[in-house]
């Protein structure tokens, strides 16, 4: 489905009202906005903020599991984990590219990440003390990411929506490998089963926080939904995730750490306990268990590898000059 062009005519005065009207019509028709189309400044800024935050999450998200690459329990587990962590780097790259189509600069976005002017998902600020964490991140964290991202495949901004299609396919692999690892551990020794339960106890509540604040405390959500950037509210997606995870936990044989979790027979949906939003606010504002470490490592990666960027830039410039 291609949207009608929203380009400004080459001559004559700019009729912003007409452009806005065309933009609104494209959104209302469920068509896509493309990089060269006219768009309101608020739409562009909101998208840059959301896509950058998403890209940062993919890149920072390499760290908690990346810590296990050198001590994976077998060659097979190591190969799987390596592929997964590489996928996350790829997701970050697609997303930074999508942000660039809106006029953002990749180096500037990285700068904003490491100076904490832009955020990333709160979930990656929790530690990974055992290998069961690798499995639980795959099952719960990638599972929550899928719930969040599948609707983004229909986001109104073309490059973002297309990036999400590829990303979601890879996230499904991540979720399955996590679940398979946990299944294997649950068939193992009592100590292994206890490790899985302990990891589930630590990750369940933070995974519910991944959907963001409750709808009545999420000031930008309504506008993002009106623009077709978001398709479902935070609470709606969180509910979908809980309903999806409960039967998976039963099959696995673990208990989700919420005594209030219960199926509501009237709605067919699960009721669940209160989320600790104070913890969420602390972690998202920089005071989580691993925030400082994550940012310090990202900063070191940028600084230590600056010579690669410089060499590649110089080479590209020379190549362009030779070709001219
Ligand atoms: Fe990812
Ligand atoms: Fe993933």
Image: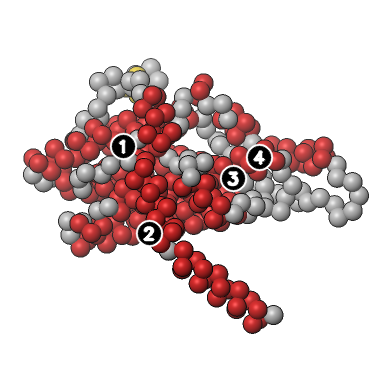
Distance, label 2 to label 4, CA atoms, is 31 Å
Q: Earlier in the sequence, mark 4 or mark 3?
A: 4
Q: Which residue is mark 1?
A: 289
Q: Earlier in the sequence, mark 1 or mark 2?
A: 2
Task: Name the secondary structure under disc 4.
Answer: helix
Distance, label 4 to label 1, CA atoms, is 34 Å
Front label number (3 vs 1) = 1
Q: Which residue is mark 3?
A: 48
> In the image, what residue occupies the spot 49% across and 57% down?
93
> In the image, what residue occupies the spot 37% across and 34% down?
287
Q: Earlier in the sequence, mark 3 or mark 2?
A: 3
Q: Earlier in the sequence, mark 2 or mark 4?
A: 4
Front label number (4 vs 1) = 1
> In the image, what residue occupies the spot 86% across and 55% down?
10
Q: Which residue is mark 2?
A: 86
Q: Which mark is residue 43?
A: 4
> In the image, what residue occupies the spot 71% across and 40% down?
40
Q: How many marks?
A: 4
Left or right of 296, for residue 93: right
Q: 197 or 25: which is nearer to us?
A: 197
Q: Earlier in the sequence, mark 4 or mark 1?
A: 4
Find residue 13 and report its horizontal and vertical position in percent: 89, 46
Find residue 144 and report its horizontal and vertical position in percent: 39, 39
Q: Is residue 210 visible?
A: no
Q: Earlier in the sequence, mark 3 or mark 1?
A: 3
Q: Residues within 10 Å of mark 1 (few under 14, many from 20)?
A: some
């Amino acid at each position: 489905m291609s949207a009608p062009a929203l380009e400004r005519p080459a001559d004559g005065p700019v009729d912003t009202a007409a452009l806005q009207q065309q933009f609104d019509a494209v959104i209302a028709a469920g068509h896509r906005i493309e990089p060269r189309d006219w768009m309101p400044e608020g739409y562009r800024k909101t998208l840059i903020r959301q896509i950058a935050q998403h890209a940062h999450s993919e890149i920072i998200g390499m760290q908690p599991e990346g810590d296990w690459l050198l001590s994976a329990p077998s060659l097979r587990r190591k190969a799987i984990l390596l592929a997964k962590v590489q996928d996350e780097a790829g997701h970050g790259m697609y997303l930074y590219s999508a942000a660039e189509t809106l006029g953002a600069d990749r180096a500037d976005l990285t700068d904003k990440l490491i100076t904490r002017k832009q955020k990333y998902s709160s979930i990656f600020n929790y530690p990974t003390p055992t290998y069961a964490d690798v499995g639980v991140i795959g099952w719960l964290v990638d599972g929550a990411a899928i719930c969040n991202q599948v609707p983004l495949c229909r986001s109104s901004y073309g490059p973002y929506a297309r990036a999400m299609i590829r990303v979601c396919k890879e996230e499904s692999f991540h979720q399955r490998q996590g679940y398979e690892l946990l299944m294997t551990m649950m068939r193992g020794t009592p100590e292994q089963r206890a490790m899985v339960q302990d990891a589930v106890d630590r990750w369940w509540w933070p995974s519910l926080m991944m959907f963001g604040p409750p709808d009545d405390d999420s000031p930008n959500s309504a506008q993002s939904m009106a623009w077709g950037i978001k398709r479902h509210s935070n609470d709606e997606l969180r509910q979908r995730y809980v309903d999806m995870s409960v039967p998976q936990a039963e099959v696995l044989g673990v208990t989700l750490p919420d005594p209030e979790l219960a199926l509501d027979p009237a709605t067919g949906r699960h009721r669940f306990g209160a989320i600790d939003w104070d913890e969420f606010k602390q972690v998202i504002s920089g005071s989580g268990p691993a925030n400082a470490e994550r940012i310090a490592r990202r900063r070191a990666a940028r600084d230590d590898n600056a010579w690669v960027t410089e060499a590649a830039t110089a080479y590209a410039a020379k190549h362009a000059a030779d070709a001219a």
